[in-house]
Image: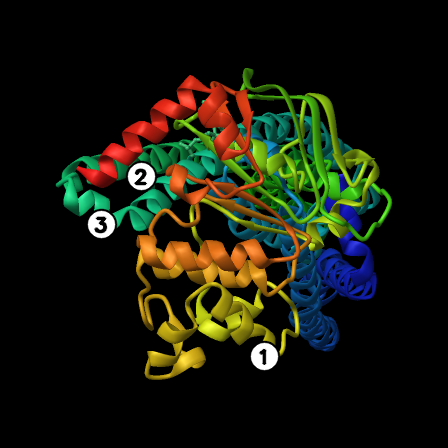
Amino acid sequence: MRAIFSYTFPYKKSASIALFLMFIELLVELAQPILMAKIIDDGIIAEDFNAVLLWGGVLLGLSLLAFTAGVTNSFFAADLSQGVGYDLRKDLFSKVQKFSARHFQNITTPSLVTRITNDVIQIQNLLFMFVRIGLRAPLFIIFALIMAFTIDVKLALFLLGSVPVFLLFLFFLLTKGIKWFKKVQHKLDGLNTIIRENIAGIRLIKGFNRKEHEEERFHQANESLVLHNKKALWLMEVAMPVVMFGMNIVILVLLFVGSQILSNAGVEAGELVAIINYATRILFTFSVFTFLIMVISRGQASAERIADVLHQTTDEDTSGKAKELDGAVRFHNVSLQRGGHNVLKNLNFHALPGTTVGIIGETGSGKTSLLHLIPRLYEKNAGQLFLDGVEIENLHVKNIRKQISLVPQEVHLFSGTVRENISWGKKGATREEIEGAAKQAQIHDFITDLPNGYETQIGQKGVVFSGGQKQRLSIARALVREPRILILDDSTSALDAHTEKRLLRTLDEQPCTVFLVAQKISSIQNADLILILHQGEIIAQGTHDELLQQSEYYAEIHQSQQEGVTS
Ligand SMILES: Nc1ncnc2c1ncn2[C@@H]1O[C@H](COP(=O)(O)OP(=O)(O)OP(=O)(O)O)[C@@H](O)[C@H]1O
């Protein structure tokens, strides 16, 4: 909660005004029983109509003042809570942008979405309620007790005695509430995961006729969320009648004791009414507390989940040397572990600037993992990785990523136009640069044939691209940056042989080091260096001709693929 509290600092003006206004409301609330006592004792009992008018007028005026203060307080409370919400979302979003694979293993994507949206809303509610009534409730109890003591010590002592019992009960509610609402937020994550998976895989679900299965999965997650929510709310709902019951007992005792004192001529009737009034209000404040406890428990649970994201250390935080790369990449005994498994073991190779490195290997052999080490999307566990002879840890992450273009295995296009999608690779790219990159990626002709050319909208509201078209568009996006290192993770798999050949020829002319993962040997046979990966190890490396001579494994794949072509 402390981390979240610091977010209120920029809004301290709004918070102070809101608290000041809340204080006015509190003072009026405290004065009301005294004024009522005046009306009864000095007005009604003394039969002085002018006193009734005077104190009644004061009561009305103060009530109007409290009303105005309340309305204005809401305005500033909203400014504070909305402002903090905006800043939290901004910082959470920016933090997530710096996340690497290990972070997404700790906190899942749907959970991150819930934290940036729903959890922030819980904090906003908490802050709003805090400056509206949160502080007013405990202050009212303290001041009302003081006022009660000024009226009659004996009766006030009865009232004071009941306070710790209520406080203990509220503390119990708070600890239970935090626990339960954390579970509720966790269940919300689970539901979001299923919704996300279903929307993304809707075609697969239809194709496999798994609609009922998915509906059942959703139903179970939905039911579990409702159940946990009900449990948490039930705890709060039970609290209210318990507090009301306790409150009525205390009032009964006060009335009984008060009537005894009154009959013994200890206090005036107005004073007894005033003290009962304070008691009723104090105890009513306790029932408000049960509602506040719900908001606080939820807010505390959400604050912990938000702080968990904000406190993650990211590699972007580390400093390092900025360097203009030539594109030399050297792996020296590099190993990588993922989920406790050795995914890459003792990799050694050297790629010279401007050369092409082809990578081949069966599925799961570690090709993607190797590629992700170069822009530091994964962090190696052992060995050394050099870019232009400098250990990667000594280079500035952001700076080197600017010079590396990665086309991932799963192509991702953003909503927007074709032009926007290509220029996404380079801020402020000119028309010539965008079209030049599209030509190199062999997609320019296809784009110009579209009704709106480069201004064509992509996605649900526009043209839906085929797998091969998407791959070429994302290669254009990578090329527009004029990278020093270009990484293509199986990015030509959906292209026809003719287009792939033309694309590979263009890539060969690029003045950068190219890493090219492929399934077909024909896609990489012209590479300057070919790496064969098998179960996380480089089992052979060299040029196509060298490997044909030296690696039985390579020769076998070559042979089988040749047969596939000729048969
Ligand atoms: N987050 C992870 N946690 C644990 N193991 C992982 C994780 N990601 C990948 N792996 C494992 O690492 C190994 C290498 O995966 P990688 O994606 O690098 O292989 P690949 O050669 O690119 O496979 P493909 O050709 O199918 O894309 C696999 O055995 C995979 O199960």
Residue identified by numbered label 3: 203
Q: Please name the amino acid that badge 2 sits on.
A: Asn
Image quarter hosting the C terminus: top left
Rendered residue at 49%/34% (across/down): 544
What residue did someone put label 1 on?
432
Tell me the quarter of the image containing the N terminus: top right
Q: Secondary structure at mark 1?
A: helix
Side of 356 where 189 appears, left or right: left
Question: Looking at the image, is mark 2 or mark 3 earlier in the sequence?
Answer: 3
| SS for dot 2 | helix
Q: Can you give x and y, in whole percent of width and height, for residue 458 in the image?
A: 39, 69
Q: Residue at x 59, y 63 (%)?
A: 425
Q: Quadrant of residue 333?
A: top right
Query: Where residue 442 sits in the image (x, y, percent)?
Result: 43, 65
**Does any portion of residue 203 appear in the rendered image?**
yes
What number is the disc on residue 222? 2
